[in-house]
Image (cartoon, rainbow, N blue to C red):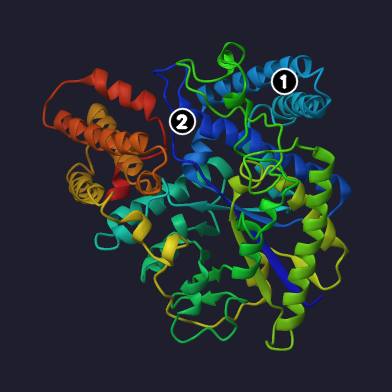
Amino acid sequence: MNGYWMLVLHSHLPFVKHPEYEYFLEEHWLYEAISECYLPLLMQLENLNNEGVDTKITVSLTPTLCEMLADDLLKERFEKYLHKMIDLGKKEVVRTESQPEFNGSARFYKNKFEQMLDYYSNKLDGKVLNGYVKFRRKGMLEIITCAATHGFLPFMSHFEKGATAQIATAVNNYKKHFGENPKGIWLPECAYYQGLERILSDFGIRYFFTDTHGVLFSKPKPRYGVYAPVYTKNGVAAFARDFHSSKQVWSSKEGYPGDYDYRDFYRDIGYDLDMNYIKPYISPDGERVFTGIKYHRITGKTDYKEPYIREKAIYKAGEHAAHFVDERTKQVDELTPLIDRKPLIVSPYDAELFGHWWFEGPEFLGNVFREMDKSEKIKPVTPTEYLEEYKTNQVVELNPSSWGDKGYYEVWLNSGNDWIYRHLDYAVKRMSSLASEYNNNDNELTVRILNQMARELLLAQSSDWAFLITAGTATEYAVKRTKEHIYDFLRLEQMLEGEDDQRFLNECENKNSIFQELTFNVFC
């Protein structure tokens, strides 16, 4: 065996929960991710486990995602969502009876949703996290954490109590859900600043991931490039993304997901069908949304789309998996004579790529592991396994970086979203001061107020809001959420000063119920 491949899936969604509404559009981000990405991945792992295929995946489950997956209200609403999709699938089978080019796909969707409900309810007992725990115990998954609310840590470097609170809360939350401390962390947006490793080390975190240039531009230059981890001065390891394997999957133009036989993401019956028919399955206000039922393939660079043929798409996913493993094997063969250890190819992706954006992605991943299982040259590995095999690594000073556009911080700090940070800076400094002032206070109401202030601040720090503003998608919602959490923080602060508004506190605790284990002194 000549080398290793490390698959890293970053699983994240911002905390979205709206108990005040029966239906809320942005909550469907979670339901789509569970049904299109997380459950299909777990079901692939079931198959691979039954087949005895050597499978190693490093998966980050962010604290916000874990909290939503464990939330009773959101679990109940997800199950209702699945029942609704099964109902729609049944109606589609009937509607397309005279359309043989679509009827096969309609039957596929109906069966898919029924199988998913059965797996979710019976195999997982209605708890998605149970699946991740199961495969972690079997050695197929290494689960890592992320900053509490995906806060952009470099923007907290000038007053590190904000970054420390993000990491402390993440470690505590991981322990709540998985019963132990995390060994590794996915830095939000892969964003690194010099000195961050001190905080990680303080909380027992052994490794993290950077983008390619985070290691390539380090000082001194990395002896093995990105094909081995490096150590920071305090011994925390950094793994860097391999550009070639990332581009092969990420790129919709040059990568596999753009193949013309794969399902087209944008052509959805939520937009195509008659309003009276589809209305029960879209937003109650009549706004058309994606249902997840799509009958067309990419076809080409044209508005005209051919019918989707599932069998052809799955066959193509198998071909692409074989090609991917062949390309990684060639990489390993080229690197082996050049370095005095087994080269490591690190391939990190957003987990939501597989199944949501690229519908056949979970099948592709399953086939990659099947192909690699046959290989005598390359095998999958986890970070902990690699660090145990190679305990000695080069010590470098990493380069500040992110995996955002242009490689640094501009996506999260520009003329469209720069107004956010003066409010966050004020709130962090005020929270730190209050945490020190009230550190020994045991008044129940005071502690509740301070704990909720800490939750509101952490939620306001989410990098998702700044990203969505820059991307121009869900901009109104992102601005609203940022302002809402800062407003909540300031109004709760007034309660500390004597204003009596327990109704408002109760509302905040019910709606923004994240991190019940949190105590405000993480900001001390």
Q: Is residue 336 left or right of residue 315?
A: left
| Residue 114 or residue 171, whichever sits in front | 114
- First reached walking from the N terminus: tag 1 or tag 2: 2
Which residue is label 1 attached to?
Answer: 89
Q: Residue at x 46, y 87 (%)?
A: 220
| Residue 223 sits in quarter | bottom right
Q: Is residue 244 left or right of residue 517?
A: right
| Residue 402 sits in quarter | bottom left
- Rendered position, 451 above or below 174: above
Within 10 Å of the Cα at label 2, are there few (<14), some (14-19), or many (20+) other Cα atoms?
Answer: some
Query: Which mark, residue 26?
Result: 2
- Rendered position, 459 above or below 321: above
Q: Residue at x 25, y 53 (%)?
A: 415
- Circle 2: element type: helix
* x and y, in percent, of residue 88 in the image: 68, 18
Amino acid identity at mark 2: Glu
Quarter of the N terminus within the rendering: bottom right
Q: Residue furthest top?
A: 276
- Rendered position, 414 above or below 68: below
| Residue 264 or residue 145, whichever sits in front | 264
Residue 70 is at least partly visible in this image: no
| Marks 1 & 2, CB-CB < 8 Å contact | no
* x and y, in percent, of residue 519 in the image: 34, 40
Q: Is residue 209 left or right of residue 131?
A: left
| Residue 338 or residue 131, whichever sits in front | 338
Q: Residue furthest left?
A: 498
* x and y, in percent, of residue 503 in the image: 25, 17
Residue 190 is at least partly visible in this image: yes
Q: Residue at x 63, y 69 (%)?
A: 244
- Circle 1: element type: helix
Within 10 Å of the Cα at label 1, are there few (<14), some (14-19), or many (20+) other Cα atoms?
Answer: many
Query: What is the spatial separation of the Cα atoms under label 1 and label 2, in whole angstroms?
Result: 22 Å
